[in-house]
Image (cartoon, rainbow, N blue to C red):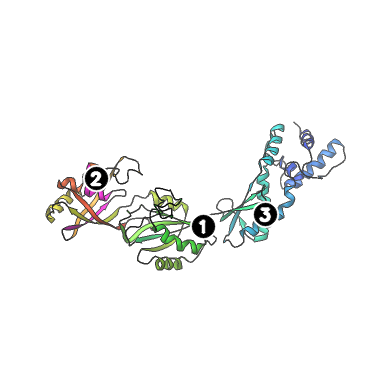
Amino acid sequence: MELDEQLERILAYGEICDHCLGRFFGKRSHGLSNGERGQGLRVAHAIERNIPYKPHEGSCWICHDLFSDIGIWAARVGEALSGIDHSTFLIGTRVPPLMAESEEMVWSDLGLTGPEPLKSEMNREVGKAVSAITGKSADLSHPDVVAILNLAEGAVELEITPVFFRGRYTKLERGIPQTRWPCRVCYGAGCERCGFTGKMYPDSVEELIGRTAVEAFQAADAVLHGAGREDIDARMLGSGRPFVMEMVAPRRRAPDLALLEEAVNRNAAGRVGVSIGGWSTRGAVETLKSEKAHKKYRISVEVEGGIACNELEEALDRLKGAVVCQRTPTRVVHRRADRIRERRVVDARVAGQEDGRFFLDVVGEAGLYVKELVSGDGGRTQPSLAGILGRPARVIQLDVLEVEGSEEME
């Protein structure tokens, strides 16, 4: 179909603005805006048909003259971005179904190739206007904030890109989970079981760090990503466990991390401590989760009927270097896949003795269930200390002394 015939058919649909007309032929000619292209096509059509030139008048049946409001939309975006730290932005547009269907109908009816969607032009034109107003630049790949134009409601919706920082935490108090644990009864809604908090435990490492961080970043929430996790009844000592903290929808993007570290340690004193190493990224979260770091534990062990130190040391020698087959422990099988995992015991030795109990230092591969390495978990873990000794053994207390991990998680 010839260009002039396509123009004739498009104009027959009804009154159309130069922007929408020009967008249908977005790949024809370069260096023109859609508005300029549409006006030129209208002139060319009048000359070809030898008819009076008729400029656009009235309301466009596709966009309802949306592009005459570019300045209004840019002002709305500027107002929405006010008070939010950002260096870059990106514009997105939520187009009402009727508008999208209208232009798609023309594309289909005329078999047009290379038309530009309305939302693309709106994103670009409003983006240029916002940049002129704010002095900020658009970033198509990694913007600090995305402003979505909701055309149907005449509103701007913001999606603020998360900010990440990295560090290590120590947990000095037993009975604190690593992350928020929703109530098993109400699943976070609030009930008598949880005292209407929606949580199984009043606090978590995530919250003890996150509360202060949320305030510093003026964020909506804080999500902790740890390099593994310790049991609720275990302490995390030594240099601490590597973590990356994700700040959700932060209105401030770069508070002083040294001051944040001081504030967290002050507010969570005696319970949780942090050493913040610097800024991080979402990619570092994936690296953190995939690392298979060795962990060192200090465990207090009780053997039924008592045991001589040399007998215990002989049993531990048999565990050193052993590859242990562990079926998912009974205590966690309700929330984890029931399968057999193989993990190696790197080292195991007696570290001390007190009141009939022994302190053992155990180094194991990531994912080794240390409590079950001692108890055997009814035969689900083999070999185990209890199995080698031929009598029951159990962990009284457990501390994590060291977690290997990358110090550079940027």
* Element on which disc 1 rests: loop
Q: Position of residue 190 (x, y in %)?
A: 44, 52
Give the magenta-colored segment's residue range. Answer: 354-378
* Element on which disc 3 rests: helix
In this rendering, would 362 be left or right of 47?
left
Question: Which mark is on residue 220?
Answer: 1
Check whether the beta carbons of the residues at disc 2 and disc 1 lie within 8 A of each other.
Answer: no
Amino acid type indicated by mark 1: Ala
Q: Nearer the viewer, mark 2 or mark 3?
A: 2
Residue at point 68% right, 40% down? 98
Depth order, front residue of 206/15: 206
Q: State yes or no: residue 377 in magenta.
A: yes
Which residue, as the protein is rendered here, is positioned at the far front? 192
- Which circle's residue, 3 or 1, is located before the other in the chain? 3
Looking at the rendering, in which quadrant would you find the N terminus? top right
Question: Which mark is on residue 128?
Answer: 3
Q: CA distance from mark 2 to mark 1?
A: 42 Å
Q: Position of residue 162 (x, y in %)?
A: 51, 55
Looking at the rendering, in which quadrant would you find the C terminus? bottom left
Q: CA distance from mark 2 to mark 3?
A: 65 Å
Question: Which mark is on residue 377?
Answer: 2
Q: CA distance from mark 3 to mark 1?
A: 29 Å
Indicate whether 219 appears above or below 115: below
* Element on which disc 2 rests: helix
- Mark 2, Cα crowd under 10 Å, few <14 / some 14-19 / many 20+, is many
Q: Is residue 321 visible?
A: no
Q: Position of residue 124 (x, y in %)?
A: 66, 50
